[in-house]
Amino acid sequence: MLSNQAGEGKRASLHGHWSSKMAFILAVTGSAVGLGNIWKFPYIAGQNGGGAFVLVYLVCTVVIGMPVMMSEILIGRRGRRNPVATMELLGKEEGSSGHWRWVGVLGVIGGSLILSYYSVIAGWTLGYVVKSASGVFVGASVEAVGAEFKNFVGDWRIIGFCHTLFMALTVFVVTRGVERGLEQAVRFMVPALLVLMLVLLGYSMNSGYFGQGLSFMFSIPESCMTLAPECPLTWDSVLAALGQAFFTLSIGMGAIMAYGAYLPEDTSITGASAAVVTADTGIAILAGLAIFPLVFANGLDPADGPGLVFQTLPLAFGQMAGGVFFSTIFFVLLSFAAWTSAIGLMEPAVAWVVEHFNKTRAQASLLIGGLIWFIGFGSVLSFNVLADTTFLAGTLFDNVDYLTSSIILPLGGLLITVFAGWVMCRNSTADELGSAGTLYKAWRVLVRFIAPIGILFILINAIT
Ligand code: PFF
């Protein structure tokens, strides 16, 4: 829970502080672990050919994701305000400019746009709780499960209703304050999700196709090792891997900055970041290992897209003893995971409206939530009425996803590394990270050179 004490002589957050390091780690893990790990990672790894993509994603996570996460937390804790005000304050304090607030604004826009479609997919998981409990998947064939999914997303009224329900649940929690209840929910949800993923993994290992799944996820084509032109990994896939690293860690848009604002002074930022990155990446890999063998065992296409998890997992549960129970619990947990992430997605915008426009938390949540709910109908309709209306990256949903994951998050991450590495002075960052030792030096090299150059290089190559 949050208390109202700041470190001595330092700024205090207007919204209070996390009571312990564990509370903070749980909240950030709750934000990081979500649909990105279980729904998105397998389907974009599938669309981008598997092994080589997974390797690039892992490298991006360690070399770029981890230093960006540490930067966001330290910036947040130093500013102790919403991301827009924090960037403005620190920009001025560090002798640069208040215009750095635009990084915060980019995050507010990015988070709101992500939530607009995130809520739609989270709505699907709610729908699948009901479907699982009704027993429709028991003994169902590949075709039947596929048809069930098509009919479900094909009706905009049903998925529109699920999206509305999920947004209402999110606004409800955000209205009451980020901290209340969140800690308990995450404390229970992450371990429970882990156990169910292990059950699925056990099932998958016995499917007879585990080797094929493993090889799809981890073997890298010869042509990519030698950087030959036949390598299936394009710059677009590399950007997708970078975007996925940002998306799944909830970085590049100020969400972690907003959480960092409530972090007590004596918590190790490096330790907390390492714990979150490990848990988040572990769950994504576990999801991949559980899903790909099932994809091959059932003759499905790994590049099938957003419906992948909603078609493979019910099929597996449908054949398992106790499947109705496991399947229902699984989708309940996934909805929970999405819920704790959705709260993180709304937090920068809500904190900003509260502080900047002097609104109450309830007013701000309703206002922002209503707007996001409305925008979300663009994604609801992308799977039915507007499924054939495509431009640039595909449907409206594809475009919002591309704009946010592949452009806004990497761009936000780039600006955050430039700010933490070049604008903030050595004393400020060393003060927050608590040492000027080897670990600090490594972080500084990553944040000043490797991460920004890497992001820029990938962005330029993919877009031109
Ligand atoms: N990290 C979340 C997931 O993997 O589902 C998505 C997310 C949550 C992104 C919060 C950004 C954020 F601020």
Image: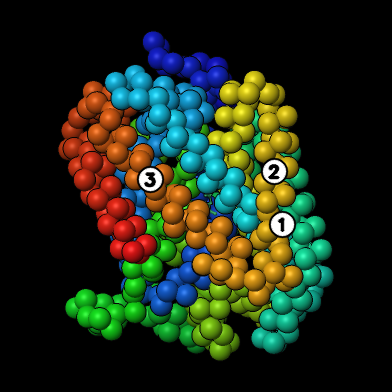
Q: Residues within 10 Å of mark 2 (few under 14, many from 20)?
A: some
Mark closer to the chain start, 2 or 1 = 2
Residue at 48% of width from left, 25% of height from top?
A: 85
Mark 1 and ligand 1: say if the CB distance to the nearest ligand atom is below 8 Å: no
Residue at 43% of width from left, 37% of height from top?
A: 103
* Label 2 element class: helix
Q: Who is closer to the viewer here, 103 or 296? A: 103
**Measured from the top left, where is residue 183 in percent x and y?**
59, 38
Residue lying farthest to the top in this orientation: 9
* Label 1 element class: helix
Using the numbered discs, state the Cα–Cα distance from disc 2 to disc 1 in whole angstroms.
10 Å
Q: Dot 3 corresponds to which residue?
A: 413
**Measured from the top left, where is residue 220 in percent x and y?**
30, 77
Q: Residues within 10 Å of mark 3 (few under 14, many from 20)?
A: many
Per the rendering, the mark at residue 377 is: 1
Does 142 appear above or below 41?
Answer: below
Per the rendering, the mark at residue 371 is: 2
